Image: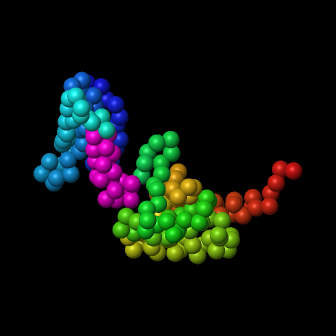
Amino acid sequence: MKIISTKYNEFGPVQLQDHGSAFVVSYPSTHPDTKGYQKEQKFSKTIGSNAWNDAQKFAAEKAKEERSSTFEGRIEKVACSYVDFNEDEEDLYHGAGEALAVIKKNKIVELHYMHDFADDQAKALCQNLLDQQNNGAKIWLGMCSGYSFCELQELDMGRTGAATVMRKIALKNAMEGFSND
């Protein structure tokens, strides 16, 4: 048996394996009675079969299907973690830049670009984010680029999170107009 690829979702690994005569996709069960167990789907390599393509497609569907139920499950973990904006979120995207995302019901409902705030607005932004977090929202810091939200870091908007946001806004504002001429 050779493991061809492994992707993770919130329930565990989704593996595409080569067993010689068949490709096997191993994926985590989401049924409450069998949570924690792996399930398997076999794709026989018979003549004329499309086993490779079928197995790849099935593995991709399982990885995405199981992950997409939560915001955290949508995070792709490669060189840097990222989330693609879905159709409901695309209108929030206004180009590249560091931003804060407000997550409610596993969707980005607000996107606050750091470059849109002056130093004197940082405290009000932090209070707004803390209020939303206290009402069940999650706050994530990241970089917007190419209709993706990447380099993700979940923030607790208490003192540490607020200090991070205010420091980043102050640094961004201090660097405006700076050049290395």
Q: Main secondary structure of the magenta part?
A: helix
Colouring convention used in this rendered image of the protein: rainbow
Q: Is residue 9 above or below residue 43?
A: below
Residue 108: x %, y % from top left = 45, 66
Along the viewing direction, whichever of 12 and 148 lies nearer the viewer: 148
Residue 6: x %, y % from top left = 34, 37
Task: Give the residues in magenta.
Answer: 54-74
Extreme front residue here? Answer: 48
Quadrant that contains the N terminus:
top left
Q: Which residue is drawn at 35% across and 41% down?
A: 7
Q: In this view, does 61 lie to the left or right of 47?
A: right
The stretch drawn in magenta includes residue 59: yes
Q: Give the quadrant of residue 146.
A: bottom right
Q: Residue at x 43, y 48 (%)?
A: 76
Residue 131: x %, y % from top left = 46, 75
Asked whether residue 76 is in view, the answer is: yes
Q: In this view, does 124 lie above or below 32?
A: below
Q: Is residue 2 left or right of residue 33?
A: right
Q: Residue at x 37, y 64 (%)?
A: 106
